[in-house]
Image: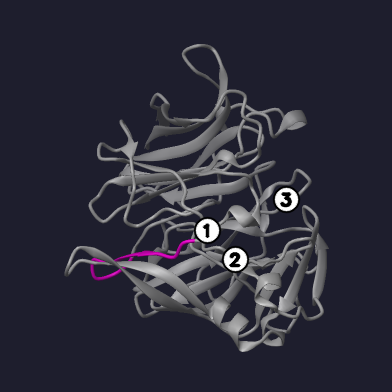
Amino acid sequence: MKVSLGDPVVVAVSKVNERVWGVHQFPALSRLPDGRILLMWHDAPDADYAHGSPGPAVVSADQGVSWQPFSGPPVPARPHFSVSEVFDGEYLVVPSRHYLNVKDAGVAMPEPRSLADCYGKLMHYRLEDFPQSVQDYFTHLECSRYLPRDGAWHEQTVVYEHRNVLAWKREGSDFLCRTYFERPLLKYNGQLLYADYRGRFALDDGFVPAKGSTTLMVSSDNAHSFQRRATIAADRSGKDLFGEPVLAPTADGRLVCVLRRADQDQKPMAINWSDDGGRTWTAPRDLCEFGVFPGLQLLGNGVLALSYGRPGVWMRFAVDGAGLEWSDPLAIIPGDPAVKYDHSCGYTSLLPISDDELLLAYSDFQHRDVEGNTRKAILARRVRVRR
């Protein structure tokens, strides 16, 4: 296998010496109906109140060589945003919206069903303990759908699974957080699949994971509704997140999922597989020494590509196309575990642009402008992988 890196393209930069966590971070790539590549990022503090507001974005018509401002439609929303190609020539966006403020809405909070220490106290509640208006908020998601018949985007609603749903919020926050599609949907065997950790569910036996879990959601009606198929990963001990999942097909037709395990502590990521369409999953096993919000793509040449970070930004490749064996890590931005927040947010995004090439988007906190000033930067870089 031979891997070659193109020169990084600077997409956007922050003000000089920007230090606010969340500003010029969390890049996300997807493809628009006209074939252009969309790249958006977060430009506000990393907080619930900043979610759902319009975020900055650019587009490229030349596979990431150059970028121009984008103003929609659709309108990109913080903190992550994705456009999914679904079936029948249609495209779908389920963006983040401003969360439900229980104080402003006069919602009486029930007793939490679980408590966890996850960047502060995290509380889960059974959705059935809330009034119908709150239940509707979690099970009817506003979306935008592109219809090829008129070449326009239309506002619609996605009906989301209502059984065993958990509402959640953080201590000191008035916002009940709900799901949105921060990664493109996966087409698989005539259905649409999404690995969801923002929308949360009790397990089949009623157990409520204290730090959340990842669930496989499936649509058989071209993303008009989604049902829960299985739990991909959950930690009953309450130690691991099993969040920020990324789902991909394997070269032999199975499914593979890579997940973040860490919260405050440095931990390996996790990886597991399904050979029955996501109905059952292997026990998660460790992958790499660290990692948050990974990117995962199966290229047309059969190579599985992985990106991850914090500290730094890294890539690995599985020539087997299944993720059972990985190459040595390739440093995009070397990082120091002692100062893991100083080089990059570590969130990465991958998008294939040919059978043997993909685009990588990431943040660089030590970018120097032409005058030598340090700024955060959003970068895009082409990566070619040849067998």
Q: Which residue is mark 1?
A: 52
Mark 2–mark 3 CB contact (< 8 Å): no
What are the residue bounds of the magenta stretch? 86-95
Report the residue marked by disc 2.
Answer: 99
| Amino acid type, residue under disc 1 in the picture | Gly
Residue at image point 69% right, 84% down: 130
Q: Residue furthest top?
A: 371
Amino acid type assigned to the residue bearing label 3 in the image? Ala
SS of the residue at dot 2?
A: loop
- The answer to which of 298 and 86 lies nearer the viewer is 86
Q: What's the CA distance linking mark 1 and mark 3?
A: 25 Å
Residue 291 in percent (x, y) is at: 64, 44
**Mark 2 residue type:** Tyr
At x 57%, y 58%, the residue is 245
Kindly report the distance in space between the C-alpha atoms of the residues bearing marks 2 and 3.
25 Å
Q: Which mark is residue 270?
A: none
Most prominent secondary structure in the magenta stretch? loop
Looking at the rendering, which quadrant does residue 355 occupy? Answer: top left
